[in-house]
Amino acid sequence: MKPIRWGLIGASTIAREHVIGAIRAQPGGEVVAVMSSDAGRARDYATANGIPNAGSDLAGLLSRGDVDAVYISTTNELHLAQALAAAKAGKHVLCEKPLALTVADALAMVEACRKAGVVMATNHHLRNAASHRAMREAIKAGRIGKPLAARVFHAVFLPPHLQGWRLDRPDAGGGVILDITVHDADTLRFVLDDDPVEVTALAQSAGMAKAGLEDGVMAAIRFKSGAVAQLHDAFTVKHAGTGFEVHGTEGSLIARDVMTQRPIGTVTLRTAAGDTLLPLDDEGLYVRALRQFHAAVRGEGQPAASGVDGVWSLATALAVLESAKAGRVVRVAPGL
Ligand code: NDP
């Protein structure tokens, strides 16, 4: 099988903890180079992760003939320019969420990739979880009747090694809404197979985030079908556990421990007939995302979450942010 060779843009934690391994888990998946803003950091990162080439020059990485695709996992304000440059260089693009800081910028990234004829994906790992896929399938099969409402519990404790730019850099897209609410928005769209229309939200700064950033939020979202969803996201909550529920006219789906990076958790289908645990596989979320991405590069499918999906999740999160600031209902405007 022809290899798919990756360049990493950003010497990040997420690449080290999840994505490098997911690339290497694919037949033909290779990581050939890493780029950091700091040459020394790039070298150290390359050595620590067994990557043969390192540098601090984006143009240098993108001019490499042995790089087919790039994974962008820098801080969020950098994604736009890096994605545009990668598309121009003819590289396929897997970009971290949020795609950018404005919807217009995210749309420009999608358009640049479309024009260049390269695959673009957003790294929304949660729609790759067996739990969320099982919920989507159960809803499509009519097992809960018509979905009326969803509840997302995604209030967690930001681990100490990630307590950096998310808490004090508004310019980098810090704050819990651009970090976690984007994932909820994508997962809700995926599970419900529905698009958000409007949101209302209250945010808090409960002592962890600084510089005007929020570290907790509760929001309500109305979808096109009329279904409503509520979510609670936070960096500050140590012991709540996570969950995702969908309640329909004939039954409920109750998932626990599923807003996570690992293939864990349970999904219970509850109807008049009683409770049934849905069977779940345990494929890694990022491994599946990379598998789909590689298939798309080979012309054999679509990425799990496209660039357009990333535009939707960003538009929803920005509406939540605006609603929390302005104190009113805000329409979700993906500009598509
Ligand atoms: P990190 O803070 O680990 O990395 C972001 C950037 O910070 C890196 O590109 C690097 O810059 C710089 N950096 C990292 N470590 C250091 C250090 N020790 N000293 C100096 N600079 C450092 O962020 P994350 O990996 O948590 O997040 C990166 C992106 O991935 C974000 O867009 C985030 O939203 C997204 N993300 C997505 C997840 C998902 O599941 N989809 C999960 C976690 C994050 P440089 O490259 O220039 O060296």
Image: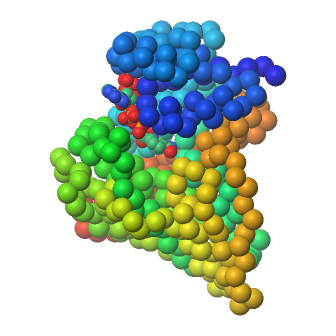
Farthest residue toward the bottom?
A: 272
Farthest residue toward the left?
A: 211
* Residue that appears at 43% across and 25% down: 11
Looking at the image, residue 161 lies above or below residue 322: above
Residue 276 visible in the snapshot: yes
Along the viewing direction, whichever of 32 and 98 lies nearer the viewer: 32
Is residue 279 toward the left or the right of residue 155 in the image? right
* Residue that appears at 53% across and 11% down: 53
Residue 224 visible in the snapshot: no
Along the viewing direction, whichever of 198 and 24 lies nearer the viewer: 24
Image coordinates for residue 118, horizontal then vertical, percent: 63, 27
Name the quarter showing ligand 1. Answer: top left
**Displayed quadrant of residue 76:** top left
Looking at the image, residue 52 lies above or below residue 169: above
Image coordinates for residue 213, horizontal then vertical, percent: 24, 51
* Residue that appears at 79% across and 35% down: 300
* Residue that appears at 71% across and 87% down: 274
